[in-house]
Image (cartoon, rainbow, N blue to C red):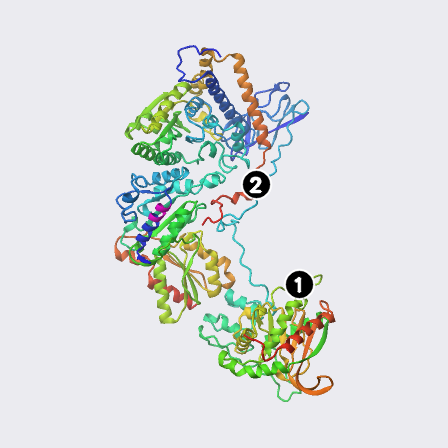
Amino acid sequence: MAEKTMIEAVRDAMFEEMKRDERVIVLGEDVGQGGVFRATEGFVQEFGEQRCMDTPLAESCIVGAAIGLSLNGIIPVAEIQFADFSHPAFDQIVSEAARLHYRSNGTWSCPIVVRTPYGSGIHGGPYHSQSIEAFYAHVPGLKVICVASPYDAKGLLKSAIRDPNPVIFLEHKKAYRAFRQEMPDEDFTIPIGEAVVKREGSDMTLVTYGMMTHHSLKAAETVQQEDGTSVEVIDLRTVSPWDKERVLESVQKTGKALIVYEDNITGGFGAEVAATIAQDAFEYLDGPVTRVASPDVPISPYSGILEDYILPNPEKIAAAIRKLAAY
Amino acid sequence: MTAIKGATRTFGLTEKQLLDIHYKMLLARALSVRQRILQRMGRGPMTFSGEGHEGAQVGTAYALRPGVDWVFPYYRDVAVAVTIGMSAREILMGFFARADDISSGGRNMPSHFSHPKLRIVSGSAPICTQAPHAVGTALASKLRGLDEVTAVYFGDGATSTGDWHESMNFAGIHKLPVVFVCEHNSYAISVPWRKQAAIENVAVRAEGYGFPGVTIDGNDVLAVYGAMLNAVERARSGEGPTLIEAKTYRLVPHSSDDDDRRYRTREEVEEWSARDAVAAFARQLTEMGALDDKRETELNDRVNEEVDEATDQTEKAAAPPPESAVRHVFVETEGAQ
Amino acid sequence: MAFTLTMPEVGETVTEGTIERWLKQPGDKVEKYEPIVEINTDKVNVELPCPVSGTLTEILVQEGETIPVGAALAQIETAEGEVPAEIAPPAPAEEPKPAEAPNEKAPVAASGGEAPRAEAAPAATAPAADGRDGAGERRRATPRVKRLAEELGVSLAQLTGSGPGGRIVEEDVRAAASGGKAPTAAPATTATAERAAPAPAAKPGAEEETVPVTSIRRTIAQRMAASAFSAPHAWLAMDADVTDLVALRNAAKEAFRQRHGIDLTYLPFMAYAVVQSLLEHPYLNASWAEDKIILRRRINLGIAVATDRGLLVPVVHDADRLSVTGLAQAMHELGEKSRNNKLQLEDVQGGTFTLDNTGAFGSVISMPIINLGQAAIISLEAITKRPTVVAGNAIGVRSVVTLCISFDHRILDGHQAGAFLQAVKKRLESIGPDTGID
């Protein structure tokens, strides 16, 4: 077993899949020289420029060409340099990739992965910090994954590459180098759609994903030590389709639900989780279903002071836990 | 078989093939007309006619290899679909949105042709989103070392979109085996060409992307065929993309929801009617000695019979079961994650 | 044959049209698909094609008139057989393949999914707790607490809430279920309720004393009455010679206590014999359902436990999978929970057969009442040393126990109950010093 950072895990996942299946190629801006985050370090040397291809600065075409490639025997992994720059490709993702299989009555399919760094907390300003999962989780025909841990990243990226459906794979950039985790030597995958309980508890269920998982775990530890409150933390990992059963099972046990997400609160994906819990676990609730998220302000301003003011952090999450626990 | 007379270049086509081209133009025309009529009779909510474009469409499609080469049509390309091999029945199944409609099972609007065996790829309604797909498919052919050409079709309005420019650029960089076919009919619904672009011919744009563009008379089906042969040859020999601009005219409104009297004169329409590709080719064939009244009648009868029979069959065909609306959001395989 | 030409829907959102110009006049022939009239709509101007061949006989709407979609425009006389059959929307095709479950995560319906139903109603069904009291005022309790109250048969209307703002919390409900008063100021995290018995409200000097009925008492009363008055009870008893069992137990009890930390009583042996016998006699593990008998596949053995609040019947689920030792542990745990008021809902639900340890308070013979919804109930009476006939005609002293079974004569006849009891007796009599209990 070796310890790896998340960016290494992402790199390893792609590298191993490209070795395993010669149909897999990566394309995107700057991937040839290793990628601005080093996700494709060494790929040209190993696989050549045909399988690690620099593209022009044209996001719609990157995704559109990936769709075309996938129709003709290639499994493309398209890198969009930052999630904030994916919007020109919105039409290709939503009108084309998501709908090709449905509109052709199942006769064409689109096995592409669009992977991109997302998320805030690194002084990236408004255009290197956005969360985009809500836009795509809303679209039938897409799978949307948000990872912030090396193990999850590797297992899920492999699954995404092997999945015959289009997958939007979001890697929280703050987690790229922040943690190391032990990785199995042998090939492993994590099923798309499976959440994981990262901390067991009995007084409250906290549902989250991305960097907020790490913040939530810190907050849960704090309230355990200081108040004896036992919080169960569930990391969704896959935002769409999400693991309703796991979450509802937990809320049935604890009676209280807190949903934590980095994105703007209104219409952020956590709102969907909250609505589902309120509807399907109503009889088990011992308190209001509560969300912690960024306020409705563009994420996120460059100044650290301004950014910190907006984003959820362990202290804000702990305060929300305490408030709900006292209900 | 009579020897072909006259000075018309026939690019190696036999008399049989020439008559086949004529037949396909007639069939496409008849299908456009029939769908227009059926829509007016209230049998279906929507139709897009291809009347007037038959020369540009059949001429280019005839140079492709059905089931080998890749075709990305847009919603006016009924004659492309017919030429590549879709039957009248298959096309009308889409009009009636039947369960067995090969294009989409009634899920996509009519005229959004799709046929996996013929390598006609399902498209959408946003304009020119198929161009990046086409260059992706062409890139795959190149990466895999396959002898395949990709043809992507669009109108003049499409050449203003970002997707079109990004795709042209991409194709030029990689010298992709792709042919961009612009059916330039001078209108994007009601917006005339002079409000769409600052230039006269779309073809000049190709130079900006590093490959040749040619402007041809889209209503001269053989000239179109000749230009396409060149482009296909270029693609297959690794010389890269070509932009073919076929100048033609849409003889009818944009769609069943459009009233073209609001933006163009009847004189203009009549002027172009007189240059209609179908009639022009019939005259050419007559001059060549390949066509006479008897043959013309035979062909028309065959076409009418085919369209009538197809209309009957498809009118009676089953609609999709309502609950099937929720299927095929994702690929339905066991073990798919 | 006469055919009526009607105004079709010629474009999306078109609801009406105005006749611009008739292209044919009465008496004119018209071909199928030939344009017959020009119509103005607010979207498009259309030439309407005629759906049939024939002769126009009558114009019904004049030029300049406006008509809605579907209105009759003209009459046409066609040749016989020309009129197209009603183009009814064709029947939808059969689903081409069986509806294989799509990607299991794909939703089946757009509307909100069904709420997961709670577990099937527990054995101890109590009157549904209503959040409103007689005055119609809503009591504050969260859905979870309301649900718990319903399950435990507690009426929220009679409770004072000890939670924030007077809200009724879980502890209040549990306390009420156990018969005690709700504590007036209980911190949310600590859970033990007081177990004060209801104080008799006596008028000084009255000839009688009125004792209010606790909810648990009320529940017992209702269920016992329902059982006794709906199921025709019949009763059998048999004696079993358990001398060897007694010997085994006496020999093993020290070591058992050392090893497992709990006492080894006769009850797990009885439970074991009962459960194994139920496997052979499925009609004893059943319910009466008017026109059918429901045989329960699982054997969930209820053990009647006497507590100072009243009779409770916690359940050992899948008791047939446990050894004597396993049963002893399970029953000990349930007994502890019962006495300490720590039973959970699932501990009292799902019972299929009941064992009553009447011997614990000295009974040598009894006629228990069947647990409502089951087929029979068996009691373990006190084991006593009795003079018995042994080996031929001699008299000896043996440890003997009387096994009693009450059974629902709608489901069972005497010989079935007797056969079952025989099986239990034989099992008990075969337990001896060499019997393994782990």
Main SS category, magenta section: helix
Which quadrant of the view contains residue B147? top left
Q: Is residue B133 visible?
A: yes
Amino acid type, mark 1: Ile
Against C319, residue A141 (above or below) is: above
In the rendered structure, which segment of residues is drawn in magenta? Answer: A15-20
Lateral position of residue B185 relative to residue C147, left or right:
left
Looking at the rendered image, the quarter that the N terminus of chain C falls into is top right
Q: Nearer the viewer, residue C308 or B44?
A: C308
In the rendered structure, find residue C96 and report the number of the disc placed on it: 2
User: Where in the figure is residue B143, as x and y percent of width and height?
Assistant: 34, 36
Mark earlier in primary sequence (1, 2): 2
Residue depicted at x 53% and y 67%: C146
Q: Is A16 in the magenta?
A: yes
Tag 1 residue: C294
User: Where in the figure is residue A311, as x and y percent of width and height?
Assistant: 32, 57
Q: Secondary structure at mark 2?
A: loop
> Is label 1 on the same chain as label 2?
yes
Against C279, residue B227 (above or below) is: above
